[in-house]
Structures are given as structure tokens and as C-alpha cells.
Amino acid sequence: MRARKRRGSRRDAFFAIILLLLAPIAMTPAPAAARDEVGTGELAAARPGTVFRIWPLEGGVKAGYKGYRVLYRSTGLQDEPIAVSAAIIFPAAGATSPRPVIAWAHPTSGVVTRCAPTLMPDLAGTIPGIDQFTDAGYVIVATDYPGLGAPGAHPYLIGKSAAYAVLDSVRAARTLKDVHAGKRFVVWGHSQGGHAALFTGAEARSYAPDIELLGVAAAAPATNLIELFDADRETSSGRSLTAMALYSWSRVFGFPLSDFVVPHAERSFGRLASDCILDLADFMKEDSDEHALARNFLSSDPTKDARIRDIMQKNSTGMLPHGMPVFIAQGTSDELVRPKITRAYAKELCGGGAKVKLHIMSGTPHLTAGMNAAYAASQWMSLLFKGATPPSDC
């Protein structure tokens, strides 16, 4: 999810930041998607993490580093083999020992195939903390998640789907000899990616026992989805969030959108739900499409529908393994992921035995939570890779 303030304040408070972050991207056309078809037989014969295709990464990789865009094998919601795309960024020089790995889980970029971050001309520049990670010599893997950059419907905020994609991206990096990726990794995510990171923490031991998750770092993570959607229902951010979620879930779980979207709003709803948020032009188009969406575009409250409520409950973040180190960053000015909800979840994690460091950032809105937390998060990660125990607020 991307933060989007109420009308007026959004343009005044965020536009300069958006311009600085995204203007260089907007000046260069995004590359066309590389050929990403994988045959049924090829998928069926592959183990999770198998790399099917490799292309040079068009993503602003810094000097001394190399980058690939890869297509790799992961697991779908029905335990079926699927192809997912990711970026792998690693030191160009050889290595004498396995390198630590950072698995980056990105915030909302959209819910349709063309919205893959690996298709951006400056993917590397959108990963908070990348300067600290490259200075330390880490390997960085960044999944697109299923359905973004590869065929299929994107399961938006569906926890296991994202977790499997993250875990298999680490496996994929380990199969490439010149990457020298070790089995020890930390997952780091923002917003939708924070949700993915927390689910990765829950699924790692059972799904991928061959790799070692040292800790989970999440900035402004989506946690309790029912509370999140209910709190944001009357905001501009909430309208975009609801549109993308309903569009995705209708495709993944097979219910008609007409159950929730009033007929006169269907066209504008479809435009907003299929927007990407990859560059400045996309951001401005989403703003325009949101203006066009009728304020009363819903015929009923999705959080009161048994089907939607079940999806939200099953994909709200739960407990993590006892003793798991967790870093959670939260801005006090976040109007999308509310600080109260994040604090409550951190308290629950402590009660379940996780070792939680809660990093509160005064005045930080949702959009910049990952960026503002990156240095503190990288310092916390470095302790894990050194075998030290990070501080806990539990």
C-alpha cells in the first residue's frame, strides 16, 4: 500500500517527496516485459527456487554490483507450481564465503501483471536501505510477488502467496553460482511488503527449512486487515486500497465484482483498480482515476460480507515463532496503517514470545516509513548477521 493523504494536504505535503523519488524514473520509459512464458512440463519438473530465465536487470545498479531479473519457480495458493519474477542484486567481485541475503518485499505497486517493480528503470533506487546493504556486501533479492511481472492473478495481501514468493526468491539467488548467496537471510518489507515479511516469518521454517531466516523487519506493515479496511473506509487511501483488494480477490477467489460495486461506478472502479504505482505519471494517473470514482461506489460494506471477512481474517498477521527477532517501524503521522493497530500487534507478538524492537518515528507518514526506518533497520540486521542479539522492547 502507498500512503495517500486527504485532499489538499496530499499535494502540499507529499508532492515534493514524490517528485524527488520518482521524477528520474518517469523520464525513462519502463522496459517492456521480457518473455516470461514457462511451459507446464517445465514448471512441474522444477523444484521451488529453480531459475527458468535470466535477463540483465535494468534498475540503476550501483558501481561494483551486478543485477539480474529472473523468473523462478514458486508455489501457488493451491500448492501448484507457478513462475514468479524477481530481481537479484549482488557484488560483482568474487566471494570466498557465502554472502548474507536481504529479501526485500515491496509496497503496493498495483495488482495487474504490468505493475512489476522489476520492470522499472530504477528498481534499485526504490529499495530503502540499499546503500547500507551494498556497503555491507549483502545480496539483495526483490520478488515481484505472483501475478506481477509474470502471468496470473496477483493475490493482493494474501499472506502465504507472498511468503512463498519471498522464500523461493532467496532459494533462486542461491542457485546462481556468481551470486554466492548464503542460506542466512533477513526479510525486510514496507506496507504490503511488511505484511509479506511477517507472513514470511510465520512460514519460513515449515516451507523452506533449507534456508535460515534470522529475523523479520517491517515498516508500517498491514496487520489486522479488518481493522485496516474499516479505519480507512472514508479516506482517499482507503478507496484505492479497497478497489485494488476487491479487484484482486474477485479474480483469485472467483466472486463477481457486481456483488460490491454499483453499476454506474464499474468503469471508473476498473480504471483505478488496474492502475500501477511505479512512477510519477502512474501516481498522477491514480490520483485522476480516484477523483473519477464515485464516493459511494460500493453497494455494501465489504468488511461485513462473510466471504471478504473470511479472506481478511485468514490473511491478518498472526504469531511468529518463539524467540524470533522482529523489527517494526511505525510513523506517528501514518493515516493508512494506523499507529494504534501496529502497537497492538507488536504487543501481541511480545506476548507470543517474539523479540520485538518497536521503532516509532515522530511525524513520519506512511509513504516514507520504509525510507525513514532504513538506517535503523539496517543496523538491527547487521547485529543478526554478526550473531548478536538485537535489543527487544518486550
Image (spheres, rainbow, N blue to C red):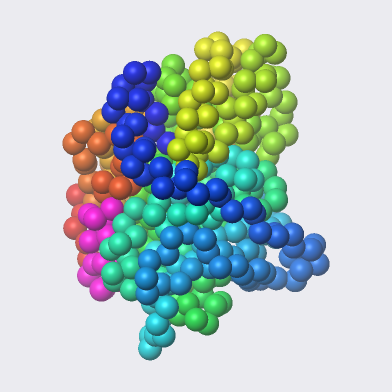
Left or right placement of residue 184 versus residue 306 in this view: left
Residue 222 place in picture, x, y as percent: 42, 39
Would you place residue 257 above or below residue 115 in this image?
above
For the N terminus, the image quarter is: top left
Which residue is found at the position 64% from the left and 15% from the top?
265
> 355 or 18, which is in the foreground?
18
Specify start and end residues of the magenta stretch as a single range.
374-388
Outermost residue, bottom side: 96
Left or right placement of residue 256 versus residue 123 in this view: right
Which residue is found at the position 45% from the left and 72% from the top?
66
Q: What secondary structure is the magenta-colored segment mainly?
A: helix
> 329 or 355, which is in the foreground?
329
Which residue is found at the position 67% from the left and 19% from the top?
266
Residue 367 place in picture, x, y as percent: 35, 37
Looking at the rendering, which quadrant does residue 52 occupy?
bottom right
Which residue is found at the position 52% from the left and 12% from the top?
295
Residue 39 place in picture, x, y as percent: 79, 63
Q: In the image, is residue 372 part of the stretch drawn in magenta? A: no
Would you place residue 67 above or below residue 261 in this image?
below
